[in-house]
Image (spheres, coloured by chain):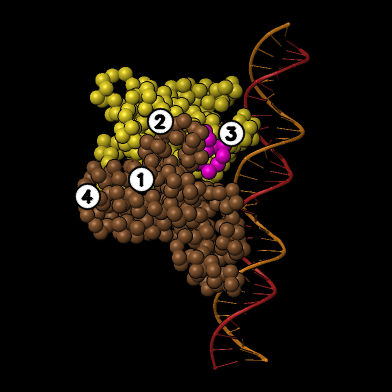
Chain colours: A brown, B yellow, C orange, D red
Amino acid sequence: MTPEVADVLESAAQSGRMSAADRREQILAAATAVFGSKTYVGTTTDEIARAAGVSQPYVVRLFGTKQKLYIEVIRRAYDRLLDEFRRALPGPPEGLDKRLGAAYTGLLAERGMLPVIAGSTQMGGEPEIGQVARDGFGALWHFIRVEAGFPTEETRTFFAIGMLINAVVGLRLTDDYGTGVNATEVLDECFPDAIEKVRALLPTADEPW
Amino acid sequence: MTPEVADVLESAAQSGRMSAADRREQILAAATAVFGSKTYVGTTTDEIARAAGVSQPYVVRLFGTKQKLYIEVIRRAYDRLLDEFRRALPGPPEGLDKRLGAAYTGLLAERGMLPVIAGSTQMGGEPEIGQVARDGFGALWHFIRVEAGFPTEETRTFFAIGMLINAVVGLRLTDDYGTGVNATEVLDECFPDAIEKVRALLPTADEPW
DNA sequence: CACTGTAGTAATCGACTGATAACATGTCAA
DNA sequence: TTGACATGTTATCAGTCGATTACTACAGTG
């Protein structure tokens, strides 16, 4: 959770009232967490509202429709990732791919951020949502190619690994870690250093979003 | 479409009545196409029924619940993919990865099959469905490791590329091919030989599933 | 203090959807 | 032919969900 969101939540606890701009940010953070834990259609505006501590109609009124809220969540997630990539850019070229990869898995710390990006890659069928997802993905590609200067082959591999991470997270392969033979193998072989990061940030029983 | 399904559809056109087993297969094929075009929650049993040419309650009765139908669709898709992999196994070892890759993209020819697999990688949050998806993915991994004999690194790369294909398909990047700069670049650079295959099998306006 | 705009809720509605029940029709063996 | 089972359909329900409406409360300003 970013410091800003923490501030917002604190001020909410004090007053119970918030500026619309702050409330928007808070709801967007809650929506990211909830949307990330289910599919777009599978999450209700009421769940998001309860996660944000407001009423369901208020969520709808602030964003117009559920779809507009979701689109803003996706857009924010891609923007956020692009920021992290930019932050990882400075430094020696030989470690750049490692730094960029770490920037991606680091997003696991913001609940829902990475699952939302992963989920958006399956929303191409919805016209408006799909366009936002394609634009976001395209922007990432452009960044890696042009700003990071990756050649074709490296770019392809970089994104491929990213999509594998998406699948591992989306499948909740970590649920089977230690019990399922194949899942344990996949995680140990592919992401030995990221396992703890992944496991620490899965939805918990008391916070099922 | 497999020859078997074609036979089934033909016999349906003749009699209007079908054995329950054949009808199951037909509905499963239709469900694969429809589920593949949307999310699990986003598709209705009525759409599937209309795609299969039967009434909505009959779909539910044949499979118990929508979830059980979806689970069977996923299971079938993973089984089908595993079959294709097995079929691609014989031959010189140096071309094995190419043959297995072609087996995967070849599944694009069966409408919905590949999107269903892609979509299942984001269903880990649903307990029962997620378990089926994890099992399916684990079985694929086991096959590539043990039966195909891929070493760790190659296995990882193979699946990573597969997940990138899933993302490209799920995003419908092909919709922007020729118009969107980044989409064109991604497709040209990553899958120059698969573009035609992908484009040919996207949902069409008259068959929006 | 009164006024005004902003933040927020309670109540409710209409549409959708998965599921159920009751009924209909076809097929086949004795 | 007739009974019995398998293949379907029509009608309908109960729950869910996004959205709308009408209302409330608070904060700052003159």
Determine the chain carrying the residue at label 4: A
- Is residue B90 placed above or below A69 in the rendered structure? above
The disc placed on residue B65 is none
Provide the residue designation for mark 2. B141
Q: Position of residue B33 (x, y in %)?
A: 47, 35
Q: At label 1, which amino acid type do we have?
A: Gly
> What residue would you read off at disc 1?
A162
Give me the residue at 26% from left, 20% from top. Answer: B92
- Mark closer to the chain start, 1 or 4: 4
3D distance between C-alphas at marks 4 and 3: 49 Å
Q: Nearer the viewer, mark 1 or mark 4?
A: 4
In this picture, which residue range is highlighted in magenta? Answer: B122-132
Q: Same chain for marks 1 and 4?
A: yes
For disc 4, the marked residue is A94
**What whole-number distance in Å separates the C-alpha atoms at marks 3 and 2?**
24 Å
Residue A187 position within the rendered picture, expressed as x and y whole percent measured from the top left:
41, 38
Residue position marked by numbered label 3 in the rendering: B68
Q: Nearer the viewer, mark 1 or mark 3?
A: 1
Image quarter of residue C28: top right
